Amino acid sequence: MANTNSNSIWVDADCYDGFELSRPQLFREETRDLFFRYFRIKPSDNVIDGGCGTGVLTRFIAKGLTSGTITGFDISKNFVEYGNKRIDEEKLSDKAKIVLDDGFALSFPDNTFDAVVNHNYLGVLSDPAAGLRELIRVCKPGGNISVSSGTSASTGTGMGSGQFWAGEYPLEGMERLKELMDKYNQAYKRIVTTSALKQSHEWPSGRFPKLFSVCGLTNISIMPVGAAFAYNDNYWSDEYRVKKITLDINDEIRIITENNKDPKFSENGFSNKDCDELVELLQRKQNYLLENYRTDDSWEWSAGLNCIVTGTKPFLD
Ligand SMILES: C[S@@+](CC[C@H](N)C(=O)[O-])C[C@H]1O[C@@H](n2cnc3c(N)ncnc32)[C@H](O)[C@@H]1O
């Protein structure tokens, strides 16, 4: 029997902006062919995207398919609804759809899909081995199954590590902002553990290649791809930058304020006073960026490493 405890964390999830804004830093238009090679997908394949959330990867792959299709599934009906709306808006409905399904008990018959992908999905499960076995079940023999997972390229509310430079803003209080953010992150790491998120201790993402092997997949490889973002990087459109400044910082403030209601944050060195001061400094930075993002030259940036583990489902003798 699978341990399905993590479902309670995700069933009502509705945090759209974080996924929509961070994923394009990894799934960049010009890298689609590379991802197809690493995921071992052909443009004519019928693909499934596990725990697809709002469907950024689903849409990214759909755009590279010719006669193929992609079906995303997720346990949050909010994500399914939002994701299908985005698919419609981007006129991809002939190739892509998202369905409500539980990855521990998928409604698809055995051997349905040519290829299986997912990003940051298996690692959130309380039982990644059970989740992977379901993905293998619905994949055709000879088909390829991939998991993509990475450290976050965000500025600090998550637990991911990577490369981060706080930038040199011509603004008072930015050193203090960094100090307070470090304090918050230290408390966060002590409190928001994998146990609190009902994730598995047995199969952290570093052990996925081994998990693939234990689950009988062959021809396993590990391919690296990076994600990065800077407000000053002209790669990003004005529209994207303004969304990052507005929605990302609002999200950061919301998460920090919500978390700080838990007295454990004060007990772990991040007081309510620290929280108020941090929020005020984040708002100061947000206001500055909104007014100056075109001319600012502060070069705050962040980056993270993503790895794609892929294996082949063997044919039965
Ligand atoms: C960290 S999010 C990643 C979302 C998306 N793949 C992305 O990277 O943008 C994990 C996703 O797994 C979904 N999920 C968690 N448990 C699931 C389950 N048992 N069945 C289906 N989806 C599940 C969550 O609802 C959430 O959308």
Image (cartoon, grey):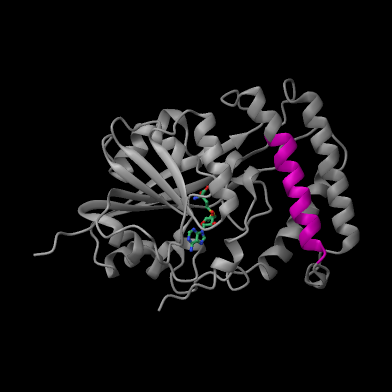
The answer to whether one can see residue 122 in this image is: yes
- Percent across and percent down for residue 156 are 68, 51
**Outermost residue, top side:** 295
From what the image shows, is residue 85 above or below residue 272?
above
From what the image shows, is residue 289 above or below residue 317?
above
The answer to whether one can see residue 170 in this image is: no
Pick the residue in front: 6 or 197.
6
Q: Split into 4 quadrants, where in the image is the C terminus? A: bottom left
- Percent across and percent down for residue 220 are 26, 56
**Outermost residue, right side:** 273
Q: Split into 4 quadrants, where in the image is the N terminus? A: bottom left
- Give me the residue at 45% from left, 29% from top: 29
Query: Which quarter of the figure has residue 167?
Result: top right
187 relative to 56 in the view: left or right: right
298 relative to 56 in the view: left or right: right
219 relative to 152 in the view: left or right: left
Question: How many numbered marks appear?
Answer: 0
Q: Is residue 39 magenta?
A: no
169 relative to 93 in the view: left or right: right
- Give me the residue at 67% from left, 29% from top: 241
Q: Is residue 258 magenta?
A: yes
Pick the residue in front: 133 or 148.
133
- Percent across and percent down for residue 168 are 75, 35
Instruction: Tell me which segment is drawn in magenta.
Output: 244-261
**Outermost residue, left side:** 317
Main SS of residues in magenta: helix
Query: Which quarter of the figure has residue 238?
Result: top right
Pick the residue in front: 58 or 275.
58
- Percent across and percent down for residue 305 are 48, 48
